[in-house]
Image (cartoon, rainbow, N blue to C red):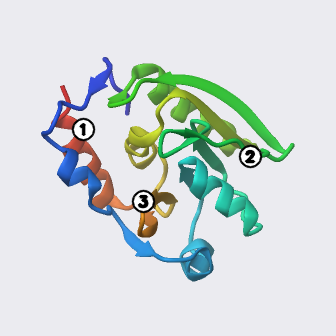
Amino acid sequence: MTISRDLRLSAGTLEKELKKPKGELFKKFQELDKVLLEAKYLVTVGDFVSFSALENNIQPNLMIIDRKVERKEFVFRIPNNYLLLNTINPKGFVTVKAFKAVKESLKLIGTGFRVCLIVCGEEDLLGFPVVLLFPLSTVMLYGQPGEGIVAVKIDNESKNEAKKLLSLFE
């Protein structure tokens, strides 16, 4: 799957829907043990959830970060065993370039690399390409501000939901 043009979230249309957790909500990383054991791949979207994974001795196959937490600078040490990729994705967009970077990350992971995709702009919406591109049984984690960690088990239902929501972008 690919996209042929940059997709923009139209103001106000999906914001309420996108704020709802798209998977199971957990309060602490320690509660994720069973979910993580079943994962083919683990992807984290967001700086704090990526940092928290590393702090809990969990190394995601892919971390997607923008060096910010709640719009404030947030820098943490990325382990040396990660291949670093960069992309551009403005706030409110899923760009073709960012989509391709997620696709490239998956190829690299398939050859044994761990990847950290550093986004110039904002990474929040890049969970969509992760759900669409990664294989079934992948687990994607992202932070739900003020509530905890959302774990999305990628399955056919989550892929269909992602396609549906992306189709509503401009």
**Between marks 1 and 3 in the image, the one whose residue lies nearer the viewer:** 3
- Image location of residue 122, percent across then percent down: 46, 33
The residue depicted at 51 percent of the width and 62 percent of the height is: 139
x then y, percent, for residue 79: 82, 47
SS state under label 3: loop
The amino acid at mark 2 is: Phe
Q: Residue at x 42, y 59 (%)?
A: 145
Q: Residue at x 55, y 40 (%)?
A: 72
Mark closer to the chain start, 2 or 1: 2
For the residue pair 133 and 124, the one nearer the viewer reads as 124
> What amino acid is found at the position of numbered circle 1 in the picture?
Leu
How much space separates mark 1 and mark 3, taking CA atoms? Answer: 22 Å
Which disc number belongs to residue 166? 1
**Residue identifier under label 3:** 145
The answer to whether marks 2 and 3 mark residues whose Cβ atoms lie closer than 8 Å is: no
Position of 55 relative to 95 (above/below): below
Left or right, 130 with reference to 159: right
Question: Alpha-carbon distance for marks 2 and 1?
Answer: 31 Å
State which quarter of the image contains the C terminus.
top left
Q: Earlier in the sequence, mark 1 or mark 3?
A: 3
List x then y, in percent, for residue 155: 37, 62
What is the crowding at mark 2: few (fewer than 14 residues within 10 Å), some, or many (at least 20)? few
- The answer to whether one can see residue 103 in this image is yes
